[in-house]
Image: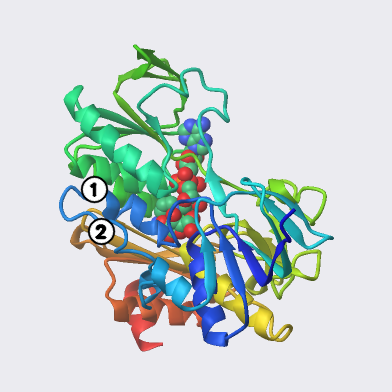
Amino acid sequence: MAAAKQYDAVVIGGGNSAGYLGAAWVKNNSGKLAILGEEPYVSYERPALSKAYLFPEKPARLPGFHTTVGGGGERHEPGWYSENGVDFLTNTRVTAVDVAGKQLTTASGDTISYDKLVVATGARAVTLKDFKTPGADLKGVHVLRNVQDADSLIEAMQACKAAGGKAVCVGGGYIGMECAAGLAMNGLDVTVVFPEDRLMSRLFTPEIAAFYESFYAAKGIKLLKGDTVTSLEGSGGTVTTAVLKSGERLECSLVLVGVGARPNTDLFAGQLDLVEGPPGGIKVNSNLQASHPDVYAMGDVATFPLQLTGGTPARQEHVNCCRQTATYVANQLASPGGPAFDYLPFFYSRVFSLSWQFYGLSEGNVVMHGDQSAGKFGAFWVKDGRVVGAFLEGGSDEENAAIKKTVVARAAAPADLEQQGLAFALSS
Ligand code: NAD
Ligand code: ISD
């Protein structure tokens, strides 16, 4: 039997965060690193898939968006990893990990030993099969998480156009909103179905949501609120109709499901402390170290104490968190201990000509400002007299940086915050 390969550190998962860890690892000159990813590609900037990848003209394609371009760094294609002594093993699925024995096994039967392990297994898209929705596995029903999903979706858009052009997006969150825009830009007739009373209800206030909803309506996108898909019907194995809880029947030849993601923790059940119930994930301490001292977790799968809220467990499914946790873990591997991982929640989206950013916490009273009819508006969340969160649509780099600064400083909110609006952030 061949001896197990040995590395100073192994990353399981070749997604967004793995690329950023690789970059910091090489910079730190930390030793022999392997990154094991089941996708056929080295790390790429996942956010592109629900945005520019779907553009009808000049769409983003690999190798254009390999990490670390989204974070303002170099583009690391496969050659970069080999030139820098990092074994990035694509098409490599890890099937078992012996945490105590510091060894893992891949689907092809290889055994790999490590000194330190970094869990970057990310999250998987929830599907309608998870809800046992009849018809969930019909052709034409898609989720979007990786390049393969995006390529299938693009192929499905062509088939949908040829079959009448009607598409349904299930879910009114990030994927539902961004993909509805992508499908509409490709000339499809799109209906979005979701259970809440407004788009992006996890973050948007009713006033914020109203702006995007009327923008979508003007683009011909129909929004069916307070409803869900109870079954899908098909003909010849391909979807033809979405049947809703309300009884409504939507003719369609493409269904895109964006109903959330679940952290991939299965390999570690019974071996590491996991967070049972929401937010799920692998529990790590303020140095992003799991319950075994030689294991770290980062990116979408890591549940860490959020310093901003006094250490409440947080799992942030966001590329910004992937980048920051990855750099932090690489630095921990080079030099353990030190200041806690301190994260400022950040979310953003871009759809059609729109672009918004949010920093901080959506807690307390909401103070709206700006002019929705001019496409430039925002909101501050004020708690105990301090600005704890800020949202801005249509902001320039300078304006977005200003709202971030206001949140970081926990600026005292003036009585006329609504009138001052963005000027308050710019002058803080
Ligand atoms: P999400 O949590 O943003 O939205 C899920 C939506 O589906 C919600 O509206 C929810 O109520 C709805 N839903 C849940 N069950 C449903 C059901 N049975 N029927 C109909 N609707 C249902 O999740 P998502 O949009 O699927 O995104 C998945 C992941 O990708 C998230 O981690 C997200 O943060 C990430 N993502 C982020 C961005 C971004 O930051 N711009 C873009 C795309 C994806
Ligand atoms: O910003 C994003 C985005 O569009 C994603 O798909 O973050 C994500 C992932 O959830 C994090 O990698």
Answer left or right for 125 relative to 303. Answer: left
Q: Within 10 Å of the Cα at label 2, are there few (<14), some (14-19), or many (20+) other Cα atoms?
A: some
For the residue pair 296 and 288, the one nearer the viewer reads as 296
Residue 77: give x, y in percent of width and height. 38, 68
Q: Is residue 202 something that shows in the picture?
A: no
For the residue pair 21 and 205, the one nearer the viewer reads as 21
Residue 122: give x, y in percent of width and height. 57, 54
Q: Is residue 127 something that shows in the picture?
A: yes
The amino acid type of the residue labelled 1 equals Phe
Rendered residue at 49%/61% (across/down): 318
For the residue pair 207 and 63, the one nearer the viewer reads as 63
Q: Earlier in the sequence, mark 1 or mark 2?
A: 1
- Residue assigned mark 1: 215
Answer left or right for 177 relative to 32. Answer: left
Mark 1–mark 2 CB contact (< 8 Å): yes
The amino acid type of the residue labelled 2 equals Leu
Gap in angstroms between the C-alphas marked 1 and 2: 9 Å
Answer left or right for 382 relative to 109. Answer: left
Residue 347 to residue 145: above or below: below
Q: Within 10 Å of the Cα at label 1, are there few (<14), some (14-19), or many (20+) other Cα atoms?
A: some
Rendered residue at 53%/50% (across/down): 38
Rendered residue at 49%/39% (across/down): 259
For the residue pair 53 and 281, the one nearer the viewer reads as 53
Residue 29 to residue 234: above or below: below
Residue 57: give x, y in percent of width and height. 15, 52
Q: Quadrant of residue 32?
A: bottom right
Q: Nearer the viewer, mark 1 or mark 2?
A: 2
- Residue assigned mark 2: 354
Placement of the C terminus among the 4 image quadrants: bottom left
Q: Quadrant of residue 300?
A: bottom right
Residue 71 to residue 196: above or below: below
